Image (tube, helix red, strand yellow):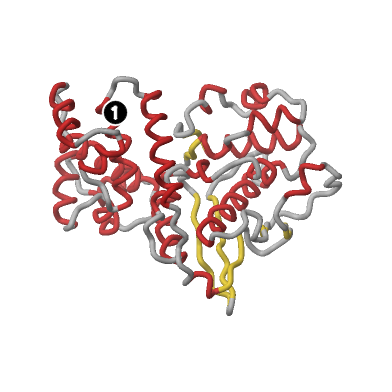
């Protein structure tokens, strides 16, 4: 069963209420609970999220519900992906890093870069099936992809056309909410967006202020989610910094608003250590990537901060009793 962060449908309740419907009732019909959406980093079943969006589109009589929902969202719906690519030099580098880490947001989704002469397709696929259908989920996902790519290029959030394989909806209506949507093309051979080939070589727009704001907002989130639990707060930060290649005790301490010596001292008072937390997070991320991710074991070792694959494999065997490859064969969906 593939999973996705519940934060992917931020603003869902507000949009449903605008159409005079009860979002809690729709969640229950899809087999979900409102409590699952309180923490954006809660993972829920991907097929059920697809079903929720289809139910909402039908009840709200809005065939473009997925696209409309994205118009109310910000890059925060993608979790840490924007932060993970913030240091990449070019748009192409950023897209490659996204595909390596997409499982952190949604397991079962893949992004493929397909050269087409002077253009390139960014084709999104989701290996999920829902009895309700997939049209709204693909609308949402493609629109979020476009929003993300526009941020890399530093252009308007509606600057890219959304290409969708689904047919054009009948009776789209004159809903004023549809007037601000990006250009849409239906019955296309792929789901995604198109760029000029030259745009891949463009400099990745790095918004340092937005990155710092993201870390500060995340600190407030940690303090509310783990009140008084410094070890859990540190684990969370370590998990977010490891894939960036910039994880160290100094950065973790800074993200938590303290000096590294203070962090070490407070952890020791509770029988914890930075090194121990680091190993715990490494094991958790390694198992998650081996189960759902697309990286090779060599790439995974580097992402987790190991200079040598052999050292990673030795540590993993110590954690689980078997090699990474053997563990993956046993647990891969």
Q: 107 and 34: which one is in front?
A: 34
Q: 27 and 74: which one is in front?
A: 74
Q: Residue 131, position in %: x, y? A: 65, 39
Location of residue 166 (image quadrant): bottom right
Q: Which residue is mark 1?
A: 232
Q: Is residue 275 left or right of residue 133?
A: left
Q: Residue 129, position in %: x, y? A: 58, 44
The C terminus appears in which quarter of the rendering?
top left
Which residue is found at the position 53% from the left and 75% from the top?
A: 198
Q: Taking 229 as reference, is 209 above or below it?
A: below
Q: Taking 174 as reference, is 166 above or below it?
A: below
Q: Residue furthest bottom?
A: 117
Numbered circles on residues, count? 1
Q: Residue 283, position in %: x, y? A: 25, 40
Which residue is found at the position 53% from the left and 62% from the top?
A: 153
Which residue is found at the position 45% from the left and 31% from the top?
A: 42
Q: Is residue 213 left or right of residue 179?
A: left
């Amino acid at each position: 069963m593939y999973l996705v962060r519940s934060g992917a449908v931020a603003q869902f309740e507000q949009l449903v209420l605008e159409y005079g419907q009860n979002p809690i009732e729709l969640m229950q019909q899809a087999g979900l609970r409102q409590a699952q959406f309180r923490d954006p980093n809660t993972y829920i079943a991907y097929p059920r999220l697809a079903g929720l969006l289809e139910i909402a589109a039908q009840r709200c009589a809005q065939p473009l519900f997925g696209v409309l929902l994205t118009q109310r969202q910000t890059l925060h719906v993608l979790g840490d992906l924007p932060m993970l690519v913030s240091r990449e030099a070019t748009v192409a580098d950023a897209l490659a890093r996204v595909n390596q880490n997409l499982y952190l947001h949604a397991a079962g989704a893949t992004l493929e870069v397909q050269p087409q002469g002077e253009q390139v397709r960014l084709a999104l696929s989701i290996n999920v099936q829902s009895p309700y259908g997939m049209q709204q989920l693909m609308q949402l996902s493609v629109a979020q992809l476009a929003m993300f790519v526009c941020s890399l290029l530093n252009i308007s959030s509606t600057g890219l056309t959304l290409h969708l394989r689904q047919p054009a909806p009948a009776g789209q209506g004159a809903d004023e909410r549809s007037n601000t949507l990006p250009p849409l093309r239906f019955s296309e051979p792929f789901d995604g967006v198109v760029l000029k080939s030259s745009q891949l070589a463009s400099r990745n727009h790095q918004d340092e202020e937005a990155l710092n704001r993201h870390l500060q907002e995340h600190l407030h989130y940690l303090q509310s989610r783990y009140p008084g639990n410094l070890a859990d707060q540190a684990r969370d930060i370590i998990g977010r910094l490891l894939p960036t290649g910039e994880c160290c005790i100094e950065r973790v301490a800074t993200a938590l608003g303290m000096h590294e010596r203070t962090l070490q001292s407070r952890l020791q008072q509770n029988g914890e250590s930075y090194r121990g937390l680091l190993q715990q997070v490494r094991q958790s991320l390694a198992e998650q990537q081996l189960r759902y991710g697309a990286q090779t074991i060599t790439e995974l070792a580097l992402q987790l901060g190991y200079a040598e694959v052999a050292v990673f494999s030795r540590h993993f065997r110590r954690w689980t009793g078997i090699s990474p490859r053997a563990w993956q064969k046993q647990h891969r969906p």
